[in-house]
Image (spheres, helix red, strand yellow):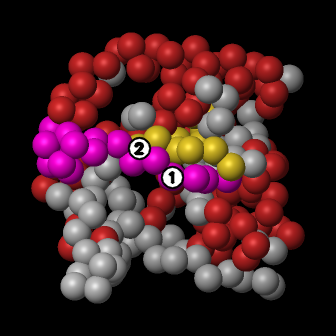
Amino acid sequence: MYRNLLKRLFDFSVSLLGLVLLSPLLFLATFALFFSNRGKPFFFQKRPGKDGELFNIIKFKTMNDKSDTEGNLLPDSARVTKVGAFVRKTSIDEIPQLINVLKGEMSLVGPRPLLPDYLHLYNNFQKRRNLVRPGITGWAQVNGRNTISWDQKFKFDVWYVDNLNFKLDMKILLLTVKKVFCSEGITQEGHVTSDEFKGNFL
């Protein structure tokens, strides 16, 4: 019952309330990033949702578009702006995804939506993460986020799919608040966020 109707009702209600309560913060972040990123405060990217269906994820843009002499984008670490670094550290960049939740493309809690390029790299076990809507936060995020291996992330994601319930969602949301205030697990050693997934077919 909760997995379908009640979870969606909970997501819709909380995301709507969150957008209203956080509107001043959203305005300030949009204003600051508008000037920091030359008129581009938001970042849109295709991500796979439930059953692999693609949607446009909405986030605050924390990196500029600087490129080298050949037109290739510079490494992430060279493109993160000062404002963007603060927005990312405080997880403010995730707030616009409440719009995705409101639209039913995402959930408050679920496996994080990864890049479409990774879809063909999943083995049968890893594919099961797409049986539910992706989330703004998830079991992997409160258990290491970007500091754990891809193998660990997938195991956490699939465990969540198999054990999804209201009590677990509330636990994850509360742990997420703690993680945000402590700024834990935002980056992986040697990377701005995490390394690239290259597949694991075992």
Evaluate whether residue 111 shows in this view: yes
On the image, the x and y values in percent for residue 187 come to 35, 66
Left or right: 42 in relation to 24:
right
Write the residue at 28% across / 53% down.
Answer: 62
Q: Amino acid at mark 1?
A: Gln
Write the residue at 61% across / 19% down.
Answer: 12
Instruction: Using the image, tell me which numbered label, if any, was put on residue 45.
Output: 1
Measured Cα–Cα span from mark 1 to mark 2: 9 Å
Indicate the secondary structure of the residue bearing disc 2.
strand
Q: Quadrant of the N terminus?
A: top right
Q: Give the quadrant of residue 95.
A: top left
Q: Nearer the viewer, residue 190 or 117?
A: 117
On the image, the x and y values in percent for residue 64 come to 24, 60
- Residue bearing the label numbered 2: 59
Magenta region? 32-48
Write the residue at 72% across / 67% down.
Answer: 119
Against 48, residue 109 (above or below) is above
Q: Amino acid at mark 2?
A: Lys
Instruction: Using the image, tell me which numbered label, if any, was put on residue 105.
Output: none
Q: Are marks 1 and 2 in contact (CB under 8 Å)?
A: yes
